[in-house]
Amino acid sequence: MALISVILVNIWIGIPFNMVILYGGLQEVPKELHEAAALDGASAWRTFRSVTLPVLKPVITVVLVLGFMSTVKILDLVLALTDGGPADSTQTLGTLTYQNSFVQMDFGAGAVVGNVLILISAVFAVFYLRANRNEGK
């Protein structure tokens, strides 16, 4: 139940930020494209799927990347809600780094976990860059 609570609070915190970014992306969709789709007889669903969604694809990608990165590095939320417990059920790499480095004073182990966290982020960044590079061609 503790993990579900942390997940729900993380989603609740992330929704306003993601909605602001998506709303900004929606403001940039040219109205002429919607007018052209309406003239062609496209339904609302078809207009969304064929016009709005492709224009929003880069914005959605940014939202997903930022959401992934904030979820991977989550520390403050877990410490405030559960402190990694009960029985380490909400332990993340961020909290493990904190526990090793600043609670147990084992800076070497904390640095190792921190480097693993950086490697995970780097691998995700490479996949993201490759996906965007192929889109531009």
Image (cartoon, helix red, strand yellow):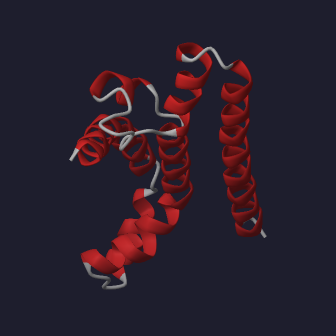
Residue visible at 62% across and 19% down in the picture: 101
Position above or below: 42 against 28: below
Quick check: 50 left or right of 105? left
Residue visible at 25% across and 44% down in the picture: 8
Quick check: 43 left or right of 30? left
Give the quadrant of residue 12: top left
Q: Nearer the viewer, residue 63 or 85?
A: 85
* Residue 114 at x, y percent in the picture: 67, 32
Quick check: 15 left or right of 119? left
Position above or below: 93 against 76: below
* Residue 73 at x, y percent in the picture: 54, 35
Q: Nearer the viewer, residue 93 or 77?
A: 93
Quick check: 40 left or right of 121? left
* Residue 96 at x, y percent in the picture: 54, 32
* Residue 13 at x, y percent in the picture: 30, 34
Q: Nearer the viewer, residue 52 or 76?
A: 76
Position above or below: 20 against 1: above
Residue visible at 41% across and 23% down in the picture: 76
